Image (tube, rainbow, N blue to C red):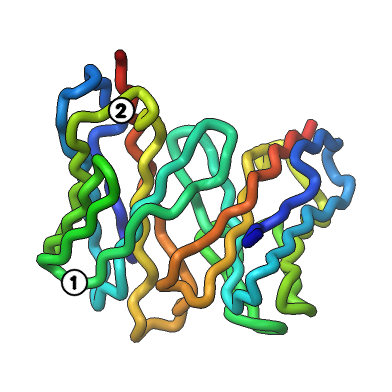
Amino acid sequence: EAQVTQNPRYLITVTGKKLTVTCSQNMNHEYMSWYRQDPGLGLRQIYYSMNVEVTDKGDVPEGYKVSRKEKRNFPLILESPSPNQTSLYFCASSFQPTGKAFFGQGTRLTVV
Amino acid sequence: EDQVTQSPEALRLQEGESSSLNCSYTVSGLRGLFWYRQDPGKGPEFLFTLYSAGEEKEKERLKATLTKKESFLHITAPKPEDSATYLCAVPANAGGTSYGKLTFGQGTILTVHP
């Protein structure tokens, strides 16, 4: 089954404690992307990756890092989380930016 | 800067009452416009891609259309199971440096009452 898998689904953490949200896809997609979704602001792109070792900033990259060492994985790293990063996060993949995207089920992050 | 604006923010319909959702965009060199459906607590699910003005696509009670400035998602005789948030999105201009950027609208929350 074609899918994008994010872990964890829910996470509560404290300010400053480094965390990683994993994202894996099984469709051999080249393009992967991370979004955050906040009430009233919609989905905003954090980072995207066109292929292995190729990443670039989206609209809201501050406070986040990503890496793409393997085609299937695209982890999102928060090295020093702050309360304003409390949000619902989605990972997505597709063959290209103009193609049909598959989204993960989301990670609800709370930073206290 | 690419912009995508959806209206209305929320729409309440009675079952069977047809209506339309609007997505206005400003991007030079449109490479496509996407429609997604999102149910509460879940990731968006792909509905349609439109690539050029005049194009139309249909799926069950939904029909998406595209002009040079906006797209419409027409919902014919909706049912309660059509209740969801509908999102549209456009990729960045192909001639720019941010080839992989994707801009979403804020979404329209559709509620269909029985």
Task: Find out whether the residues at labels 1 and 2 contact each other: C-beta distance under 8 Å.
Answer: no
**Residue A3 seen in the figure:** yes
Please state which of residues A82 and A58 is positioned toward the viewer in this rendering.
Answer: A58
- B22 lies above or below A111: below
Depth check, front residue: B79 or B67: B79
Q: Chain of mark 2?
A: B
Please tell me which residue lies in front, B10 or A14. Answer: B10
Q: Quadrant of the N terminus of chain B?
A: bottom left
Who is closer to the viewer here, B113 or A55? B113
Q: Position of residue A100 (x, y in %)?
A: 45, 65
- Amino acid type, residue under disc 1 in the picture: Ser
* Horizontal and vertical percent position of residue A29: 60, 75
- The label shown at residue B10 is 2
Q: Which element is circle 1 on?
A: loop
- Residue at the disc numbered 1: B52
Q: Is residue B22 left or right of residue A62?
A: left
Q: Amino acid at mark 2?
A: Ala
Does residue A32 appear to the left or right of A40 in the view shown? right
Q: Residue at x 74, y 75 (%)?
A: A68
